Image (tube, rainbow, N blue to C red):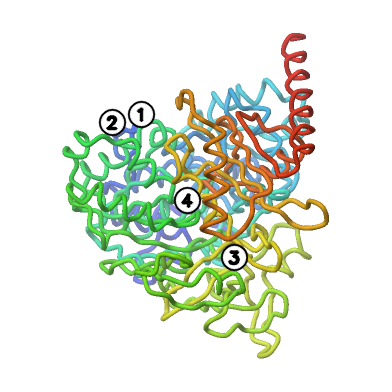
Amino acid sequence: MTQRLTNPPETSIEPKTLVELLRTRAVKQSDDHAYSFMINGKKPSEPLTYGGLDQQARAIASHLQHHKAEGERALLLYPQGLEVIAAFCGSLYAGVIAIPVPPPESGRLKRTLPRLRSIVKDAKATIALTTASIFELIATVKDEFPEFESMRWIDTATINPDLAEEWVDPQVHPDQLAYLQYTSGSTSTPKGVMLTHYNLMHHCRYLKEACGYDTDSVSITWMPYFHDYGLVEGMMVPLYNGHPCYVMSPFAFIKRPLNWLKNISTYKGTHSQAPNFAYDLCIRRIKPQQIAELDLSSWQAAGNAAEPINPQVMAKFMDTFSPCGFKWEAFAPSYGLAENTLLATTKPKGTKPVFLAVQTAAMEQNRVVVADFEQTEGTRILAGCGKKVCDTNITIVNPDTCISCAEDEVGEIWIKDPSVAQGYWQRPDVTKATFCAYIQDTEEGAFLRTGDLGFIHEGELYITGRIKDLIIVRGTNHYPQDIEWSVQELHPALRADYGAAFSVEAEGEERLVVVQEVERRSGNIDTETIIADIRQEIAEQHEIQVYGVVLAKPGNILKTASGKIQRRACRDKFLQGTLTVIADWCENPELSSQYRSLQGEVESLAEKVTASK
């Protein structure tokens, strides 16, 4: 049963859905600053107030209600900005299941549309909320994608604001699905993680406490809205906590990392999150004279998650930006995944990051043996990912036997918490395997299997790698990110965070291959010496022989939306001979020559296709 509702009733009961939350803020804090968009990463738009956001959301919802869209799935296709926040809230106001997805790009349509098409088919999406420019772009390929033709495309900028008065409250229940968060699809067909209003609201309450948000907080975010880090902590936590949020485009950050830090400095940002690569980019791209103009003393929680955390990058960032007020305590390493709404662990605000030295040889056998930091050989330094977020139940389990691990064992990270999603959309078998795990020796459950490896030491969670990315050679475990970081430290021409280590089968056993991009403006480099140095470094530091090394041009290493290396996609390109190679070496010279021959055929075919056009 529904009813018209102009203003929510006065109540002291805590809102249970995002609809109740925003409606309450629209009444009690109607003129308060909710969001601003940083145009070109620099100039703030007019502030969007809670009252203004509520009106936009009601107008969009009313339009959807006129089309009887309740329960349907709606793509959100927008550039980063305030429009997508209104569309997300508007979908929920209408009882429509929102699907935040990456917008297609004019120069990369062929690369981005297949994934978008697979999401449309999987979710059976019938609506797309978008902008006129994106609609025009999609229209150029509608004939090739009949799924798009059958959808209802709505340019939300054309919706009459007066429709807000016709909105009917759908009386959304907390257990009702709010949105589908699609996984990256880097390793398989994208899967839609089903998240309810309760998941979102419960987790925002967790993050408010665990990350130390208060009445004086200010958020700065450039993480994309279609990634859980950008949507939940970047955009929804500010709404939950009632503090202002400044939204940047990811492209504005990538183009000029200084924009991010200048906005934190100008608007006294207290909370801002990014993957490891972003901190590294700031180190390499921001000049000393620019650093002198910054004031980062307000930054209380510099979230670091979504990809492996490199302790060296953290140390370099501290050394580089401490002169402008950045504090070591501000770093907030965290761990999470969309299947748990967002974070499972984070470092408490105001505490120092924690690191642990462990013996490499023991780690190769899934054992944790603590070492001295002064011991440089045969050790590995791990960054702690913080302590559990509030009451989250985290346990480490042997992924093969499903029996709890001992304290000194590496195992799969399992999570049990109200933040855990409801499963994967229309995937009952995969849902059961991932979300309904039970510990065999205690029968405790149900747990979420994360697919990530790690251990807990003195209450701190440490991540060692992904099960599917783990390189196992002659019975020992090797974590790809460690090998990649070792390689990238060898020469300035080797692009940081643009390498992939993986295994291939050769002569009946698993062997290591490293593909590493070279900086575009590196000039003439001695590739033979660099390859030799890579082989020697890996042999000495990781005690493993390299089977093949490829120095590749930029654009070969693919990443997910959050910056994770798509190692299996790189492996496929290596095996198919479709990498664009600057130089390579292989233990099997015949394989190397075959690879070059295949690559030549691919390049020749590409030239013929281009010429024919």
Mark number, residue 268: none
Q: Quick one: label 1 or label 4, which is nearer the N terminus?
A: 1
Q: Amino acid at mark 1?
A: Asn
Q: Position of residue 577 (x, y in %)?
A: 74, 34
Q: Residue at image x 51%, y 66%?
A: 463
Residue 11 seen in the current view: no
Q: Secondary structure at mark 2?
A: strand
In the rendered image of this protein, does residue 294 appear above or below residue 97? above
Mark 3 is surrounded, within 10 Å at the Cα level, by few (under 14), some (14 to 19) or many (20 or more) other residues, namely: many
Q: Secondary structure at mark 1?
A: loop
Q: Position of residue 522 (x, y in %)?
A: 45, 27
Q: Amino acid at mark 3?
A: Asp
List the residue tagged with mark 3.
452
Q: Secondary structure at mark 3?
A: strand
Q: Position of residue 338 (x, y in %)?
A: 56, 59
Q: Quick one: label 2 or label 4, which is nearer the N terminus?
A: 2
List the residue tagged with mark 2.
43
Q: For the view shown, which residue lies furthest in the right direction?
A: 508
Q: Nearer the viewer, mark 1 or mark 3?
A: 3
Marks 3 and 2 sit apart, C-alpha to C-alpha, by 40 Å
Mark number, residue 40: 1
Marks 2 and 4 sit apart, C-alpha to C-alpha, by 22 Å
List the residue tagged with mark 4.
231
Q: Quick one: label 3 or label 4, which is nearer the N terminus?
A: 4
In the rendered image of this protein, does residue 235 appear above or below residue 8? above
Q: Nearer the viewer, mark 3 or mark 2?
A: 3
Q: Are marks 2 and 1 in contact (CB under 8 Å)?
A: yes
Q: Amino acid at mark 2?
A: Lys
Marks 2 and 1 sit apart, C-alpha to C-alpha, by 7 Å
Q: Quick one: label 3 or label 2, which is nearer the N terminus?
A: 2
